[in-house]
Image (cartoon, grey):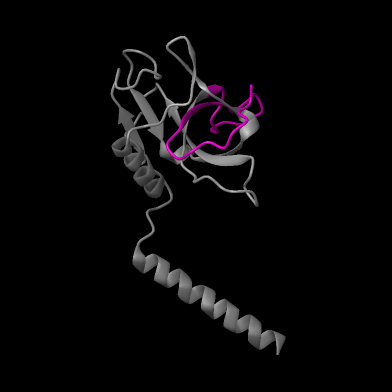
Amino acid sequence: MPITFTPQLGMVLMCDFGPNSKPPEMSKIRQVVVVSPRRKGGSGWGSCIVVPFSTGAPQVVEPYHYRIQANKYRFFKKDTDVWAKGDMVTHVSFARLDRVFCDGKYCSPTLNPEDFAAIQRLVWEAMGRPSVENIEAVKEIVEEVIDKEMVIES
């Protein structure tokens, strides 16, 4: 059943990535953590950005992978490490999301601040970890393009 609320940062939910995914996209139903802030109406309402979890360890551990040790949280599979896959960050509709089943009932748990901060960092790594220098270079390119467009329009 899809959620009927706007999830908060760090909330762990179930996501049905569905049968229409194409390799190497994420597939099947799996747990995810919400990494986008709550939006009040406007664009983005009814959807959020998530990072999926997997019980399968990556073949090569990269800076965009994060391991949560077995038995740290009651809502993950018992006795199994869980991996956040920052390189699989994606945007999903609330219609794909549901609450996690834990201790015999549905719940909407959140990660502790340290684990959530680590996952935010790994998403940054997956995005190429833009440095201040890179951001400044992009600003210069954008300004040049804008200047050229103004000349063309004149």
Whether residue 40 is situated above or below residue 96 in the rendered picture = below
Is residue 70 covered in magenta?
no
**Point 57% across, 77% down: residue:** 145
Whether residue 70 is situated above or below residue 97 in the rendered picture = above
Left or right of 24 on screen, residue 78: left
> For this rendering, which residue is in front, 101 or 67?
101
> For this rendering, which residue is in front, 103 or 135?
103
Whether residue 38 is situated above or below residue 28 in the rendered picture = below
**Point 64% across, 40% down: residue:** 46
**Point 50% across, 74% down: residue:** 141
> For this rendering, which residue is in front, 23 or 66?
66
Q: Magenta stretch: dominant SS?
A: loop
Q: Position of residue 96 (x, y in %)?
A: 62, 29
Q: Which residues are magenta?
A: 1-29
Whether residue 62 is situated above or below residue 102 in the rendered picture = below
- Outermost residue toward the right in this view: 153
Q: Position of residue 143 (x, y in %)?
A: 52, 78
Is residue 17 covered in magenta?
yes
Left or right of 81 on screen, residue 93: right
Q: Position of residue 30 (x, y in %)?
A: 50, 23
Quadrant (top left, top right, bottom left, bottom right) of the C terminus: bottom right
- Outermost residue toward the bottom in this view: 154
Instruction: Count every numbered label the image shows and give the total.
Output: 0
Q: Quadrant of residue 33?
A: top left
Q: Position of residue 48 (x, y in %)?
A: 56, 41
Quadrant (top left, top right, bottom left, bottom right) of the N terminus: top right
Left or right of 114 on screen, residue 10: right
